[in-house]
Amino acid sequence: MITSKSAHPVVKWIDERLPVFTFLNRELRDYPTPRNLNYWWSFGSIAGVVLVVMTLTGIMLAMQYTAHMDYAFDSVERIMRDVNYGWLLRYLHMNGGSMFFIVVYIHLFRGIYFGSYKSPREILWALGVVILLLMMATAFMGYVLPWGQMSFWGATVITNLFSAIPLVGDSIVNWLWGGYSIANPTLTRFYALHYLFPFLIFVVVALHLVALHMVKSNNPLGVDAKEPQDTIPFHPYYTAKDFFGFGVFFLVYLGFVFFAPDFFGEPDNYIPANPLATPPHIVPEWYFLPFYAILRVVPDIEVFGFILVEAKLAGVILMFGSILVLFFLPWLDSSKVRSARFRPIFKQFFWIFLADCLLLGWVGANPPEGSFVVLGRIGTAFYFAYFIIIIPLVARFEKPLPLPSSVVSSVLNEKKGERS
């Protein structure tokens, strides 16, 4: 309970009956945090802020949107032209999706680099992967709602992937469509689910934060905070740091909103959906491109001339497998050292892996022909080899560098080095 004599009587009265202020004080102000966290750790907080922005702007847009195939496109145009500040709400929401994925991808790669998935943070990591999956589902359904050409044909391509599943594939596709083709029931379902999923994300984010506060934060050294001087209170030290990060982030975010609002968009999506006119090149949003590349470059899997797995099914399996393999990362990497700072071989392969993901994104943005197919297959092979072969072997044979004895000793040594 809050016992400070300076606390307002109303605050004390509420806290005696519902200790919400004690909880906030313990988990947000006095929460012990490693004293050596850098700005890479601000992206988790930034992701939470973007989630709130996306939810609030989404709710306000939903008040003006009409989920009907005959009126959806026109309702979006009305939001842009006739609703007070509707253009701002839509651009905040539209570009916020890309900003959300940028922040979460940085947060994800930071976790891989510094070993934030290792014991005792396995459940924390798994919840983060669940959040990523929910984000992808939410973003895909939201991309369909403007009912432009790319919305319609993107939905057609992606939902048809489920037809590759043996026995139940066609039934799943019919359920998603609400019939035998993409039409009004499809749009209605996607609208309802797009509205629902952000609240599911909030639930999983809450569990993610509970898990974080149970096992405490990792740090750039990957060394557990053992001594009291290894940690500092979250407030005011990291709240000040996070607010600076918020400021820089929103300068970039609002720069796109006001000066390049269609930078991440597709021009074809400003054309009303037409089932009789297929766009020359169907591409999803940029944050799906690496997975889209994996989907398209997989060939038929043959054994002695017989097709064992068709290319479509193999692509679907590998596309979903490229995300699901992240769940098993804590067990694939058996090294006792967390941070790549002390793992020279792991560090080199990490940067190659990051370059490979960028390569797959570039391949996914281009037609699946010629050299792009070859590059995509090489990138896909390395992607899975990184998790299934390279990480386990590196963990077994790599000789890590010596670890510092504690967080505070490393911080003090760095300060001594700066003075000298």
Image (spheres, rainbow, N blue to C red):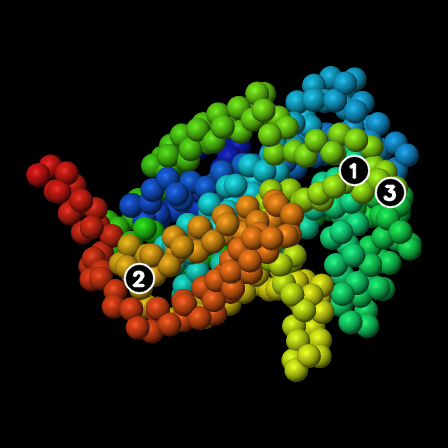
Residue 141 pos. (x, y %):
73, 45
Q: Is residue 283 left or right of residue 107?
A: right
Q: Amino acid at mark 1?
A: Gln
Q: Are marks 1 and 2 in contact (CB under 8 Å)?
A: no
- The mark nearer the N terminus, 1 or 2, is 1
Q: Kindly report which numbered mark, 3 or 2, lies closer to the viewer in this rendering.
A: 3
**Position of 176 relative to 336 (above/below):** above
Residue 54 pos. (x, y %):
63, 36
Q: Quadrant of residue 115?
A: bottom left
- The mark nearer the N terminus, 1 or 3, is 1
Give the residue pinned by disc 2: 345
Whole-number angstrom distance, CA of label 1 to CA of label 3: 8 Å
Instruction: Determine the residue located farthest toward the front in the rendered image.
Output: 370
Residues packed near mark 3 inside 10 Å, few (<14), some (14 to 19) or many (20 plus)? few
Give the residue pinned by disc 1: 149
Give the residue pinned by disc 3: 275
Whole-number angstrom distance, CA of label 1 to CA of label 2: 46 Å
336 vs 368, nearest the viewer: 368
Instruction: Determine the residue located farthest toward the left in the rendered image.
Output: 420
Whole-number angstrom distance, CA of label 3 to CA of label 2: 51 Å
Residue 412 appears anywhere in the view: yes
